[in-house]
Amino acid sequence: MLNTDLLDQEVQSLFQRIRTNLTLPECPPERLEYYIKEHSGFSRHNPMLLSVASENSQSAPAISVELQRNSDEESGASGEESHFAIYTDGLRESFQFKVDEYVLSVETKGFLETMLDLCKSGSASKICGVFYATEAGAIPELELVRNLTDLYSTSQENCQPSEKLTYFFDLHLNGVEQEHKDGLGTFINHYEQHSLNLSEIHEGFSDSIAAMDTWWNNLKQAVIANN
């Protein structure tokens, strides 16, 4: 039977493929910069996506509340500094990247549009699957992006990640993303108690995984085509 352990295996397989495909050790600095800036687009828009998903999953109130709580935490609506603001400051202090002013590529805009469509699927079960994939994927994805920033740093003279950038990664990798993942995972592992449809959960999860896979592959193809 479908459970979060099986879904987590799919997530790990996805990011192993992405890492292999990106061939990070061979990436020149400008390609590393491109990947970092493009990824920031998801960080910037994720609170909005979570909020839309919350609005569209009200048939399962507990899931709707969980998604909105995650959105509020990411956006700073809960009273803390927004996570994107921390990330923006960290990248500017470290590398002079102005990701808050960065114009996203067609590839990233397309990915965000796909995710927005998935947020509006109208099925709380499917939406739960969609965001379990993004929350479970956030851990290996942020490990990947941290690797990108480390590689970029070593490619530059007198350059190292700032305390704020280090704090951003530590905040997410040492707690936030695991909490978000576990929160949604509870609904999946106890789907009957929440009147959820297991096949719809898996459909949403698979659609989200496919969107992330396509996005990272498209980013690589775009940067190769532009070189």
Image (tube, rainbow, N blue to C red):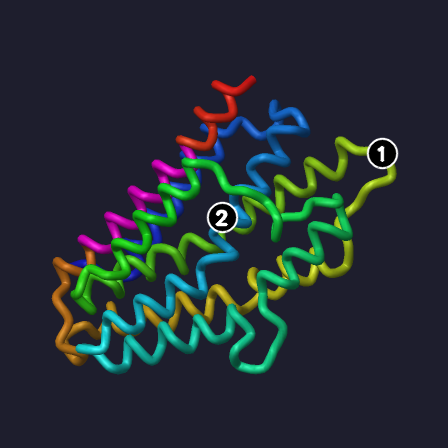
Please say if 37 is above or below 191: above
Amino acid type shown at disc 1: Glu
Residue 51: x and y, percent? 37, 70
Instruction: Give the residues drawn in magenta, as a range.
Output: 203-217
Q: Is residue 13 visible to the viewer in this orientation of the structure?
A: no
Amino acid type shown at disc 2: Glu
Q: Earlier in the sequence, mark 1 or mark 2?
A: 2
Residue 38: x and y, percent? 53, 42
Tell me where residue 5 sits by quadrant.
Answer: bottom left
Q: Nearer the viewer, mark 1 or mark 2?
A: 1
Tell me where residue 48 sits by quadrant.
Answer: bottom left
Whether residue 86 sits left or right of residue 186 in the image: it is right
Closer to the camera in the image, 70 or 206? 70
Quadrant position of the N terminus in the picture: bottom left
Task: Verify CB contact (< 8 Å) between mark 1 and mark 2.
Answer: no
Q: What residue sits right under mark 2 in the picture? A: 141
What residue do we see at 51% from left, 69% from top?
Answer: 74
Please say if 169 is above or below 20: below
Residue density around tag 1, few if under 14, some if 14–19, many if 20 or more, within 10 Å: few
Q: What residue sits right under mark 1 in the picture? A: 157
| Magenta segment main secondary structure | helix
Q: Secondary structure at mark 2?
A: helix
